[in-house]
Image (cartoon, coloured by chain):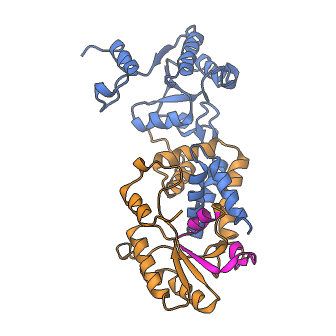
Chain colours: A orange, B blue
Amino acid sequence: MSQFRIASLDNLVSQLSRLPGIGRKTAQRLAIYILKGSEEYAGALSGAIVDVKQNTRLCRQCFNIAEDTLCAICADTTRDSSKICVVEDIVDVMAIESSNEYGGVYHVLGGVISPLAGVSVEDLKIRELVERVRAGDIREVVLALNLSTEGEATMIYLSQLLKNHSVEITRIAHGIPMGSHLEFVDQTTIGRAIQARRKI
Amino acid sequence: MSQFRIASLDNLVSQLSRLPGIGRKTAQRLAIYILKGSEEYAGALSGAIVDVKQNTRLCRQCFNIAEDTLCAICADTTRDSSKICVVEDIVDVMAIESSNEYGGVYHVLGGVISPLAGVSVEDLKIRELVERVRAGDIREVVLALNLSTEGEATMIYLSQLLKNHSVEITRIAHGIPMGSHLEFVDQTTIGRAIQARRKI
């Protein structure tokens, strides 16, 4: 009795397993779905994967995803290019954009300084950020890195680095999320929220 | 301030969202991973998707996945073709195969009879099963459908349908799963296990 295997299915399961958060079992379920699905869907999905690599690149200025040399945000002349919001990753750009509260431009660092993970200053787009601040007419740099130890350290590093330039350095507020009940919020967040309290 | 959108990324997110169990947020995370990943990976993944559709079909005899007109199991002459295990789906074939306990062949119904979901006898490969039992030298039909109400009803229907043929009809055992503690097993399963108790 030989083991029942389908080479092309095994290969698809392996490829899908490489996606973040997709284990072997999930990959198998997805592969079977694709296998049993329509020819059209398989074509549309595989085409979309190829397209996203072919039609996108990193913005020359801010390292966000772009369809051209500049991303849609940097190319948008209605946006306030004197404000740069510094984020770790392109997903953070999307998250902030979805709030519709920010009208400036971005700078995607590509991570945070993390000696343990082997990420040093040179691995990030920090030099390019300083260059933008030096070259352009920048009035404000908004630091919006995640509040991990490494994120905090990177924000301190950046504010030290930029303090000699005539630019205002701010950071986004941390506090109680909308809709949360105080009793379910962790104590660090409550502590932050109390420290950052404002007059009403 | 225009909304920041990348058409090819949006399209990939939409296509990934159609996969079972993949919501919009997960699809976005996967799409970003593909976007930021290597050209090689995107090529390998999209190629694997196309391949799995091009290189597979349904087995003419048992409706399992096949790379040829017959699946690897039906084509394997070392297997006992006088035993047919009836399952709902190709994933069930894989699950049973992974146990290495079954040496017969299969018949994939493609679902169970479910008037609520609009699945009737004609939508399943039931006629083909009866045909196999009638035509071939079949000694045993093992019913291995899932224990849903519809699965149970389908098993009763099949056993009625096949009882006039000189074939033994069995069903796989249901009971306490290996490694489970009795106190954590639901009462229906315990009831089944007691009913199906065997002399030792």
Q: How many numbered callouts?
A: 0
Q: Residue at x 73, y 77 (%)?
A: A75
Which quarter of the figure is the N terminus of chain B placed in? bottom right
Query: Quick check: B42 left or right of A78?
Result: left
Q: Is residue A137 above or below residue B13?
A: below
Q: Nearer the viewer, residue B79 or B185?
A: B185
Magenta includes B78? Answer: no
Q: Residue furthest left?
A: B200
Magenta includes A88? Answer: yes
Determine if residue B82 is in view: no
Quadrant position of residue A168:
bottom right
Q: Residue at x 37, y 60 (%)?
A: A188
Q: Residue furthest front?
A: A200
Q: Is residue A4 above or below residue A173?
A: above
| Whole-percent x, y for residue A150 in the image | 40, 72
| Whole-percent x, y for residue B153 in the image | 56, 16
| Whole-percent x, y for residue B39 in the image | 60, 69
Q: Residue at x 60, y 65 (%)?
A: A96
Query: Quick check: A187 left or right of A43?
Result: left
Q: Nearer the viewer, residue A142 or B62?
A: A142
Q: Nearer the viewer, residue A43 or A125?
A: A125
Which quarter of the figure is the C terminus of chain B placed in? top left
Determine if residue B57 is in view: yes
- The region drawn magenta spans A69-97
Q: Is residue B134 above or below residue A159?
A: above
Query: Quick check: A105 left or right of B140?
Result: right
